[in-house]
Amino acid sequence: MEKKSHIYAAIGTVVFTGILLVILLFCGMSCAKEEKLEGLMVSFGDESEGWGEPTTVVENSSASDMASTNENMLTQEDESVALETEKNKEREKEKQQQEAEKERLRHEANARVAGAFSNSASQTSQGTTTGESMSGNPMGKGNSGGHSWSLAGRSLLGSLLNPVYSGSQEGRVVVSIRVDSNGNVTDTKIAKGTTISDAKLLEASQKAARKAKFTEGKSVAMGEIVYRFVLN
């Protein structure tokens, strides 16, 4: 009888121990879950700054404002450049108009001066210069004192001077002349067609040619004077 009591006591101890272990096991798992859940809650926190969303919104808003400001600045700069370009074009146009007006006035002044010289030449050369040497003749040819001249687009002012001549030579001396824009003879040389070889007469002819005066022109003109000499 006493032996059975010991057996029952051992069985009861085992059962009780098993139940106790089961209870402890469930309690331990429950505590672990609660600790784990509590740890997750603590790490996330309950403050709004921890989420970071408001900061992102502020940054996006700032970037948008900056982009808008840059765009406005670029637009204003483009408008300023366009306005400056337009002003430059207007100034250039005004400058061209002023230059054109000055050129027109200059041409009118030159025309009046040329007309005055032409009238003077016409009045001075009457009786000494004939036919083609009249003022305004585009051929630019004429006779004066038995001699002839040719200078395209110009007219002779006054008459040709006679070279110093001893009267012992007969023939002609052709003098090539270079006339500047003011009508002055600046260079001379004996040209082809000359039939007299006397050096003194050739030099005298060039000297007389240098004293000839013609009307003004826009540029340098090239022509010739032909002196004719006849024995007395």
Image: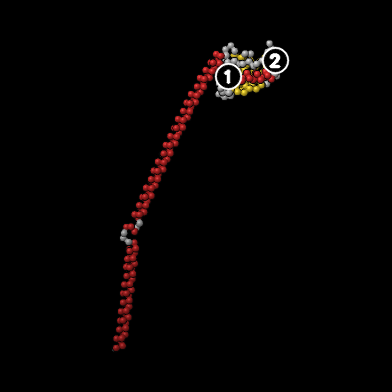
* Figure disc tally: 2
Residue under the image location 33 percent in, 64 percent down: 42
Give the x, y percent position of residue 6.
31, 86
Write down the residue under mark 2.
169
**Dot placed on the residue nearer the N-terminal end, 1 or 2:** 2
Residue under the image location 63 percent in, 13 percent down: 146
Q: Can residue 149 be seen by looking at this rendering? A: yes
Secondary structure of residue under mark 2? loop
**Separation of disc 1 and disc 2 at Cα?**
28 Å
Q: Quadrant of the C terminus?
A: top right
Q: Quadrant of the N terminus?
A: bottom left
Q: Is residue 40 above or below residue 183?
A: below
Write down the residue under mark 1.
214
Rate crowding at label 1 as few (under 14), some (14 to 19) or many (20 or more) other CA atoms within 10 Å.
many
Type of the residue with mark 2:
Gln
Nearer to me, 95 or 72: 95
Rate crowding at label 2 as few (under 14), some (14 to 19) or many (20 or more) other CA atoms within 10 Å.
some
Q: How is the image coloured?
A: secondary structure
Residue under the image location 56 percent in, 22 percent down: 182
Q: Which mark is residue 116?
A: none
Left or right: 119 as drawn, with respect to 88? right
Secondary structure of residue under mark 1? strand
Type of the residue with mark 1:
Phe
Q: Is residue 23 above or below residue 67?
A: below
Give the x, y percent position of residue 69.
38, 45
